[in-house]
Image (cartoon, rainbow, N blue to C red):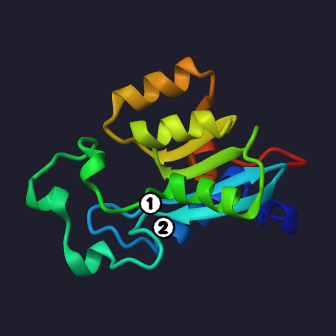
Amino acid sequence: MGLVDMRPPWDDYFMSMASLVSERATCQRLRVGAVLVRDRRILATGYNGAPKGLTHCLQLGCLRDELKVPEGERHELCRGVHAEQNAIIQCAVFGVSTRGATLYTTHFPCTICAKIIINAEVGEVVYGQDYPDDQSKKLLAEAGIKLRKWKPRAELGPPEKGV
């Protein structure tokens, strides 16, 4: 096996980064990471947690847990900013366009994130794990945003030549 064969495909590379970014998350329910990419260049990253400078949920506790809110529901009760939102916000803060970018995220976006992704004109979402939010899927599909569930190279078979 040559050195070229050992390099991860781009999807694996960026999804690995999204997973690494998720390790910074401060949500006690779910750790999510996101990486915004255009032309194989990273524009921004984000993870889920309390707004900048505020006390983390890991320290305060989780209102959604206390109220026994099921996953995928009542996002407005959450103190945290989602990973996808944080990546898009970072682009806004630093004046980087998200138009046509690809969002790599460890989990399928919720409805709130889907609406932000649509308005940010992100062109594609590559996600690792499903999330129970059917409305989100409908919105993203209606907006014409390409959706792909990531499959690691190990599940796809040997790499193609020249990738």
Where residue 157 sits in the image (x, y, percent)? 65, 45
Q: Is residue 109 visible?
A: no
User: Is residue 144 among the parts visible in the rendering?
Assistant: yes
Q: Residues within 10 Å of mark 2 (few under 14, many from 20)?
A: many
User: Residue at the spot x=29%, y=48% of the render?
Assistant: 76
Image quadrant in which you'd find residue 93: bottom right
Q: In the rendered view, does 67 fall on the left or right side of 42?
A: left
Where on the picture, by quarter, is residue 59?
Answer: bottom left
Amino acid on which the number 2 mark rests in the picture: Ser
State the residue in front, 153 or 92: 92
User: Percent position (x, y) of residue 29?
Assistant: 26, 62
Disc 1 crowd rating (10 Å Cα; few below 14, some 14-19, many 20+) is many
Q: Residue at x 38, y 69 (%)?
A: 50
Marker disc for residue 22 = 2
Q: In which quadrant will I find the N terminus?
A: bottom right
Residues tagged 2 and 1 counted as in contact (Cβ below 8 A)? yes
Q: Amino acid at mark 1?
A: Val
50 is higher (above) or lower (below) than 121: below
Label 2 vs 1, first from the N-terminus = 2
Q: Which residue is mark 1?
A: 32
Residue depicted at x 59% and y 22%: 143
- Give x and y (percent) for residue 111: 40, 36
Residue pictured at 48% horizontal, 24% vertical: 139
Question: 47 or 116, which lies in front?
Answer: 116
